Image (tube, rainbow, N blue to C red):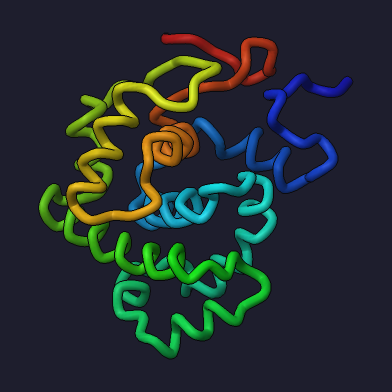
Amino acid sequence: MNKKRCDWCNLNNSKYIKYHDTEWGIINEDEKYLLEMLILESFQAGLSWECILNKRKAFKESYDDFEIDKIVNYDNKKIDELLSNKNIIRNKLKINASINNAKIFKSISKEFGSFNNYLKSFTKNKIIYETDKTTNELSDLISNDLKKRGMKFVGSTIIYSYLQAIGVIYSHDKDCFLYKTIK
């Protein structure tokens, strides 16, 4: 019998099903993962998550497996290489933002001991259980702070999606087999 999943999950896309079932909404505090998801979510602006997910492997290869010390040192040659890579999103503003955001991510990590600690300064280590929203007070606060620090493509909707992806906001639909409420 087929499991009922969130309405947004394209059941014809095995990558999407796997992402939904094994990754989305599950707490992940790994710094490399937090950077990867922040970069991918910023590329999603104006596009579907499915589009980004389908290109995730190419992003991982193009972005040196999301090694922050490599990304923060990308030069014009690397930017040109990314712009010519048909397997990723070739948007110059987003590519430049991803490099800039990685630098700010690294700075925040140094300031707070980790980017995860930075996020916890807002979340107080709590998970928010809610559905049918695209922004909330938490995503507004984090988005505004990241923008003040100089990040781009980190509006409240993008940050809300990011927080859902990394498990800070748990949003599985009520009829999804993974739905749960506060424990």
Q: Residue at x 62, y 17 (%)?
A: 173
- Residue with the most extreme right position: 1
- Horizontal arrangement in the rendering, residue 73 relative to residue 163 (left or right): left
Q: Residue at x 68, y 17 (%)?
A: 176
Residue 121 seen anywhere in this rendered image of the structure? yes
- Horizontal arrangement in the rendering, residue 130 relative to residue 10 (left or right): left
Residue nearest the observer in this picture, 28 or 98: 98
The quadrant of the rendering that contains the N terminus is top right
- Residue with the most extreme left position: 111
Residue nearest the observer in this picture, 183 or 4: 4
Where in the figure is residue 160, as x and y percent of width and height?
42, 33
- Horizontal arrangement in the rendering, residue 54 relative to residue 84 (left or right): right
Res 12 → quadrant: top right
Give the answer, above or below, for where 159 lies relative to 39. Answer: above
Give the answer, above or below, for where 27 lies relative to 175. Answer: below
Residue nearest the observer in this picture, 162 or 110: 162
Where in the figure is residue 169, as x and y percent of width and height?
43, 26
Residue 27 seen anywhere in this rendered image of the structure? no
Q: Residue at x 47, y 71 (%)?
A: 92
Give the answer, above or below, for where 128 lies relative to 168. Answer: above
